Amino acid sequence: MKYLIIGTAGHVDHGKSALIKALTGTETDRLKEEKERGISIDLGFALLPLAEDIMAGIVDVPGHERFLKNMLAGTGGMDLVMLVIAADEGVMPQTREHLAMLSLYGVKRGVIVINKIDKVDAEWLELVEAEVKELLAGTFLETAPSCRVSAFSGEGVEELKDVLLAQARLAGVRDSKAPFRLWIDRVFSIKGHGAVVTGSLLSGEATVGDLLRLDPVGAQVRVRGVEWHGKKVERVVAGQRAAINIVGVESEALARGMVLSAEHVGEVGAVWDVRLEWREEVDSGSRIRLHIGTGEYIGRLYRFKDRPAEVGRLVLEEEVAAAPGDRGIIRQYSPQYLLAGVTMLRPGARRTPPKESRVRLGEALTGKDEKEFLSALLADADEPLNKTEVLSLAGYRAPKPLLDALAALLEAEEITSLESGYVRAAWLNEKEEKLKAALEVFHAEEPERSGISKEALRQRLHLAEKTFECLVRRFVAAGWLKALGGDLALTEHAERHARWERELIAKAQEILEKIGLEDVQEDWLQKQLNIPEERRKVVWATLVRQGVLIRMGGIHVYSKTIQNIVTVIQEHFQRHATLSVSELRDLINTSRKYAMPILEYLDMNKYTKREGDTRTCGAKLKDLSE
Ligand code: GDP
């Protein structure tokens, strides 16, 4: 069975409800009565079996403001629209506005219904039809079939059904395999059952027991029961309108405009980058209403000088759950008129303009090319995305063609995997080049430093931590990058630097061998090594870091000298239990200036152990002696 949703549009009182009644026998305009009874679930909705294998549901939306709210609620899911025009009045302002909204919303297929033909003569009818033809020129309904009908007398209604059937056969089948998503249009609380929500299943399916996510709340809910057209069923599928009994959230927490979706579909944010299709341009910062799904949100629309006119940003007063590619419209806050159609891209940052990559993403989202979409999505993400993330960001797109495109791009090596995620090969090359260039600059600026700290490099490249770590692991494995503790260096530099250090140390040792226990001075060593003034500090720091010079108290002593002292003390403890300051002075033939810092150093390193004024053999020395 193919299920599809037919919507109606047209000026108020042109006979939309009457037409639905004529087509289906269902009185849909019974809001007041149903409100009084409190629990009716199929409000404004009538079933129209078009053929044995095609079942249409017609959403009726009487009244203009209600039309806007309800139509928009159904429009994302409208497979076919009936644009109703009363023959006696002809094209009216709302006819025009609805037509504009339908096309901005991306509705693709429709039927023109000239209603109330019982009220006019043939000549008048032709005039109206000419007017309609003019209206539709250049729109998605330009070539749509047109029917002359009287909902009142029933004339033309059977022919209209035939036309609807032909169009229904042409309309694509809604994808039950794509992720489930339903924009909630109404919420009930039914005694003993809890919360019941209604809406049109735009894609996917729901079965009793399924776990779904409620956004923007972010709660997990379970499907306890499903109803389709007033009957309990096991399962509802895309193209049907359903009532779903959910548990896991209080009905007070539910509201129209929220989204029930399969796990991992879409994102939530109050700031969204959008692609705009202008009908009437407004200045940046204008107050607007966004209609998306079944919700209406108030906020501001921002535009950016150095971005194309079709890219903008919505800053809304509350969070909206949407997926890239979702269509909506924006109207001026007051007075309310249509400004533009929007395609949601991805949540944006408040301060900076939308990234350049959003322009391409916007174009890809309105197209059907899965490869281009994936490529644009990855380019925009600027980080590896794993399969789950790709599917989540794909929103309504069916998973199979998307995953096929992913496999094809991997095969063609346009996309490559980076640990558990995917990136564009070009992106990876670009990061590699940038990382190399940044390191080259750093090494040239500070040749004596073995490497740059990881964090400093990450910040220079403006990369997210997780992404940066992934890249580092990848490039270290590739061999050209070297991790030295918390620092990073080009392997080539690291080797050159290690060589330089070895040579420096050897040369310094040669010089220091010639002196005994002395406080080594920086400028003295500089002269001995014959190095220019500007390199003095680096060389000194390297020798201290490498342990050639040992700093104790305020003095610096050559490490071998200390080793010799340790040996002398070791021998001393073989014959004596204790060591006093004067004994040490005699042993190493030095003054108090050196003896005190040396003792402190020996204590600290557990060669000696301080007991009052004397020292005993320290733990480390004992270990050495064994
Ligand atoms: P809606 O606001 O577009 O849903 O319009 P309704 O279905 O409520 O119809 C508005 C008015 O037009 C009602 O009084 C209907 O009885 C009347 N009407 C609807 N269709 C026809 C028709 O084909 N012929 C005539 N003469 N009146 C009609």
Image (tube, rainbow, N blue to C red):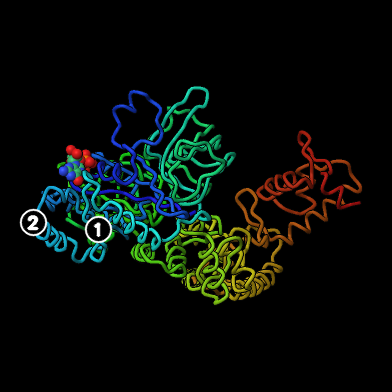
Lower sequence index among marks 2 and 1: 2
Cβ of mark 2 under 8 Å from ligand 1: the answer is no
**Residue 426 sits above or below residue 164 on the image:** below
Ligand 1, image quadrant it occupies: top left
Q: Position of residue 334 (x, y in %)?
A: 16, 41
Amino acid found under the numbered disc labelled 2: Trp
Query: In the image, is the residue at mark 1 within 8 Å of ligand 1 by its beta carbon?
Result: no
In the image, 376 versus 211, the foreground residue is: 211
Crowd tier of the residue under label 2, counting other residues whose Cα lies within 10 Å: few below 14, some 14–19, many 20 or above: some
Identify the secondary structure beneath mark 2.
helix
* Quarter residue 109 falls in: bottom left
Horizontal side, residue 17 vs residue 493: left or right: left
Q: Position of residue 200 (x, y in %)?
A: 41, 45
Q: Marks 2/1: CA distance?
A: 49 Å
Disc sitting over residue 124 in the figure:
2
Determine whether the residue tagged by mark 1 lies in a helix, strand or loop: loop
Circles 2 and 1, Cβ within 8 Å, touching? The answer is no
Q: From what the image shows, is residue 495 above or below residue 349?
A: below
Per the image, the residue denoted by label 1 is: 304
Residue 12 visible in the shown view: no
Q: Count every numbered label the image shows and give the total.
A: 2
Of badges 2 and 1, the one in the foreground is: 2
> What residue type is disc 1 on?
Phe
Q: Residue at x 54, y 64 (%)?
A: 403
Left or right, residue 558 beside residue 215: right
Q: Position of residue 198 (x, y in %)?
A: 42, 38
Please state which of residues 618 and 553 is positioned toward the viewer in this rendering: 618
User: Which residue is at a point 22% across and 52% down the rendered structure image?
Assistant: 149
